[in-house]
Structure formats: C-alpha cells, structure tokens
Amino acid sequence: MYTRKYSQDININNPEKYHLTENIVWSSPQGFDLTMDIYSPKNVPENCPVVVMFHGGGFLIRRKEILNNMSQYIATNHDYVVCNVNYRLLKDQGNTVMFYDLIGDAFGSILWIKENIHKFNGDKTRIGITGDSAGAYICAMVLNLGNKIGKREDFAKDYAFEPTYVPENMSLDEITKENLLDVKAAVLSYGGYDFYKYALQNAETYKNIFWWLALAKPRGVLGEEFNPIDHPEIYKAISPIYNIPDASERKLPPQLLTAATRDRITPVHMIEEYGKALKEKDQEFEFWEHLGRNHAYLDSGRTWIAGNDFVRDGIPALKVMMDFFDKHL
C-alpha cells in the first residue's frame, strides 16, 4: 500500500522527469526471462552516468520491485540513468539455481548494460553499482571477481563465473582481457560478505529463515556433493571477503559501505569487518552508519516487521549515496 502511495508523491516519483522502459528481457537462461527496468532522464544531455541496482532478499526472496521507490527517487531527483535488475533466485527453476548462476546473472547484466545503455542516453564509461543486503554481496562479487570468467560447467575446477549474457562475437577470454566488468564506483548497503561462514552456520538448512519465506526446500547451493566443512575452498570462492585483490595488483573503484546501527541481520561489526579486509588490501572505501535504523531501510514503502519507512529511512540514506556517486561518476 505505501509503495503505491509513495509512488504518487511527486517528490519521490515525478514521471515528467524521466522515461521508463519496464521489464526489458535482457537474457533468458534455460528459458527463464531475466528483466530490468530502465529510467532515463528527460531534457538532459545524452551520456548521463548510470546506476545499476541489485535487490536484496537472502538470494531467495524479493524481486526488483522492492527497489521501485529507490529507482523513482533517483530518476526524479538526479540526472542519472537507473537500471533496476532482476537476477535468478536460488528457488527459481524448480529450486535448482546454483549460487554461481545468480552471480553469472549479475555479471551478464553489466555486460548487457554496457552494450546497450547508449540507447537510453547512458554513458557506459560512468557506471556505478549498488545493492542492499544480498544485492550488496552481489555488487562485491562484481567488484572483486569480475575478472574471474569461465564456463559454468567448470566452476568446481576453476571457480570462475559464466555471464548469463555475452555480447555477440565476443569470447569469455576477451571479457577478462578487456576488463568489461569494471565499473567506476559502488555503494554497498548493509551486506554480508562471507558465505563460507554463513554456510557453517546452517545457511543451507531450515535454520536459514529465507528458505521458509521462499517456500523452498533447503539444499546445497553449490551442489549436493559440496559442504562447507569438507570443501571450504569452494565456499570461500563465492565469498567476497576472501577475494579482495591487493591494490598493487588490481585497484578497485571507490566504494561506500553503509550499515544500520539497529541491524540484527547484518550488524555493524560485519560491515566493519569487510572494511578492515578492504583496508588490508589498500583498497579505497568510505564507511557510513545510518543511526537508529534497521536492516532493509532502502525497501519501498513501509516494512512492518522491520519497522522501516522509505520516506523516513530511505531518503536520508539516498542523499548520502548519491553524493558519493556524484563525486565519483
């Protein structure tokens, strides 16, 4: 209800300020359509900077619509092209999606956007990425492992990810050599960045509430033959915190890490731990705490369980986030 109400608030959503192209099918892995919404500013010069967004939901629930108010607010109040992206959830395709599949979806979306965003007055050389919770994790994977490209069937051997979308006449090696997944800046909001530790704490069992919320049976997200106790390396291979490159070898773009002081899902100390890991690798980042707020403060409308309200909680955070993007894009 409040998502719709806020969509009618001209300060949050003024359709006179942008063109909206909804549900663009950018890839269809095994017949599963992946879509995105693109908001393009009106009455501004071409080649605007671009913000690509990945929603949260524990990799099992939610779709891009949970970030509708966020997309509308940016498109209404800033001269940016906004891409609100869907990726496959673990529960999709009969609960068979592997964790590396959804990462491949994220990689593919960046490649599609870089190839096509000029059609929406976007500048492919000024792309920033952002995500909240699981979406922040996905952003960290793009940043840290966007040069780790390979065939899906070889993942257990080389821990490399196959993008769901690949430009025509381009090889996977060329994507790596040309650094096509590089972006200019990133804002990672209240994410967790260690799936290995999460798996040790029963992420693949019913103790993970997101399986219940998704109405899906818990399972190994890397295949039933793997578990974090006997196969720690493959779980670390999908965990951003273990894959931060040293800045002397590969400098990552500037990042803003955000946290919420009342967050019990990804508490402040978890974000600080990731910041410490970035600092140890001499990577550039900033840290910001949203005081007195809970997890998922960027969600659309009002979330009764978390007690969040987009107007009260999301907009102040977006002002900080967009200041950061303005500085770097």
Image: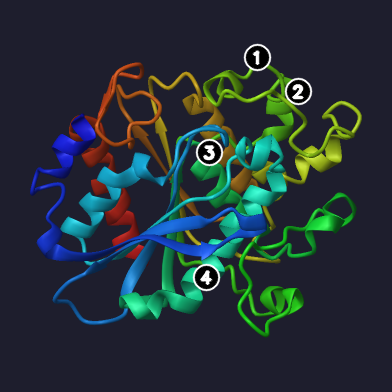
Picture coordinates of residue 167 (x, y %)? 61, 78
Quarter in which the C terminus is drawn: bottom left
Residue under label 4, please give it: 112
Query: Callout 3 environment at 10 Å: few (<14), some (14 to 19), or many (20+)?
Result: many
Q: Nearer the viewer, residue 22 or 201?
A: 22
Query: Residue 207: which disc?
Result: 1
Q: Residue at left 43%, top 67%?
A: 127
- The earlier-in-sequence mark between 4 and 2 is 4
Q: Is mark 3 on a helix, strand or loop?
A: helix
* Location of residue 16 (image quadrant): bottom left
In space, the residues marked 1 and 2 are separated at their CA atoms by 11 Å
Rendered view: 119 above or below 237:
below
> Could you tell me how far apart the alpha carbons at marks 4 and 3 are, in whole angstroms?
21 Å
Q: Which of marks 4 and 3 is in front?
A: 4
The Cα atoms of the two marked residues, 1 and 3, are separated by: 18 Å
Q: Label 1's element?
A: loop
Q: What residue type is labelled 2?
A: Leu
Rendered position, 42 above or below 163: below
Asked whether the residues under the numbered discs 1 and 3 touch, taking CB atoms below 8 Å apart as contact, a structural biologist would say no
What is the C-alpha distance between the residues marked 1 and 4? 36 Å
> Mark 2 falls on what kind of element?
helix
Query: Can you give x and y, in whole percent of width and height, for residue 299 in the image?
Result: 33, 35
Q: Do the residues labelled 1 and 4 touch (CB within 8 Å)?
A: no
x 53%, y 26%: residue: 269
Question: The disc labelled 4 sits on which kind of residue?
Answer: Trp
Q: Which amino acid does label 1 sit on?
A: Lys
Location of residue 186 by image quarter: bottom left
Name the residue rendered at 63%, 25% in the picture.
Answer: 216
Judge by depth and name the residue closer to the eye, 246 or 312.
Answer: 312
Q: Is residue 308 above or below residue 30?
A: above
- Location of mark 2 (residue): 200
